[in-house]
Image (cartoon, grey):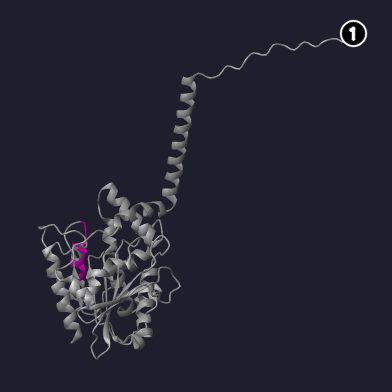
Amino acid sequence: MPSSSHVPDQQPRRRPSVHTRIRRFWLAVALSITTSVILAAIWFSITPTPSILLLRNAFRQQELTKPAGFTRVKAGVTVVHNPTYPSRYGRNTFDLYEPTKKSAKPLPVIVWAHGGGFIAGDKASMETYATLMANEGYAVVTVNYDYAPDGTYPTPVIQMGEMVDYVSTIASRRDLDPTRIIVGGDSAGAQIAAQFVVVNTTPGYSQWTHIAKTSLSSPLKGAILFCGPYDLESSAAEESSVVKKWFINTIGWGYLGRRDWKDSTELDEATIVNHIFSNFPPTYVTDGNLVSFPDQGRSLVERLTDAKVSVKSRFFPDEPSLPHEFQFDFAYPESGLVWNDVSDFLTSMMK
């Protein structure tokens, strides 16, 4: 008779209590959060990209008040949007504003670089001002350029040159005068425009920086510079709050492309006030007085004056408060003063 095997009784598995399951759930959540924080901290420490992505929100275009009579002015200006200029880099598009009624002579040209802290921005921000300047009898080219983290220094300066070169290429078919070119820019764009001028006017600078000069048909006629950081070395050395230090470090690391950017040759190269020469064209410089670079603007004016460059400027005392790039918001009466300055400057350049 076969023997029967004895199967011991199995104890039923005890299910964890509700409290235990909840505790385990929150431990898993805490572990996930801790891991995410650690990974994020590592990411932030090895690349400026996450900080740049966070900061871009600060550069979003705000709704601005247009000047009185702008609708009438706009009706007299024609715009060509988004053609491309030859470039080995990205974001190589521009807008071209021209007066609808052209003069018998080819139009002088303004090439303008938008702001955005070297990490953001778009030529569309210049729509109002470009329209006003075109109404003064200029063809106005508002240029996009690649920015950090993809477009590191000196990419935007090179692209400024590529755009100016392209003006000569299209001059005959667009009835433009490549012998009468003014460059301009706001915020980071002002630094880019100013450095482009230095590349083409300061002896030895192009060779030192390895930024090629542009084949200009004639020397640049002028420069218009709004709210630019022309002394990046002083920005790097500035004593400031933790948030502002993070902001400055993000921009410096992102644009100059080096974690040790404060000790880099690139920082010296991009500090425009160190490299002014007497060949710099007649210039108009202005800035506000709140969260901007008025001291650096005044320093640039001093260097230009020392170099015997013709320079006009407008700065403001501490009151009323005029924020960075207030010039584009005509809700401020002082914006009208700046526009009158610019209009006078442009008229003087036509002579």
Q: Quadrant of residue 342?
A: bottom left
199 or 107, nearer to the observer:
107
What's the residue at 35%, 82% (across, down)? 167
Q: What amino acid does circle 1 point to?
A: Met
133 or 242, nearer to the observer:
133
Helix, strand or loop under label 1: loop
Percent position (x, y) of residue 279? 26, 81
Q: Quadrant of residue 238?
A: bottom left
Image check: 72 left or right of 178?
left
Percent position (x, y) of residue 75? 22, 75
Name the main secondary structure of what is drawn in magenta: helix
Image check: 329 left or right of 147?
left
- Quick check: can you spot residue 283? yes
Placement of 14 over or under 139, stated as above or below: above
Q: Residue furthest bottom?
A: 104
Q: Which residues are magenta?
A: 291-301
Within the magenta stretch, is there residue 300?
A: yes
253 or 275, nearer to the observer:
253
Q: Residue beneath label 1, please?
A: 1
What's the residue at 50%, 18% (across, down)? 17
In what quadrant of the picture does the C terminus appear?
bottom left
Q: Residue furthest top?
A: 1
In what quadrant of the picture does the N terminus appear?
top right
Q: Residues within 10 Å of mark 1 (few under 14, many from 20)?
A: few
Within the magenta stretch, is there residue 196?
A: no
Placement of 121 over or under 43, stated as above or below: below
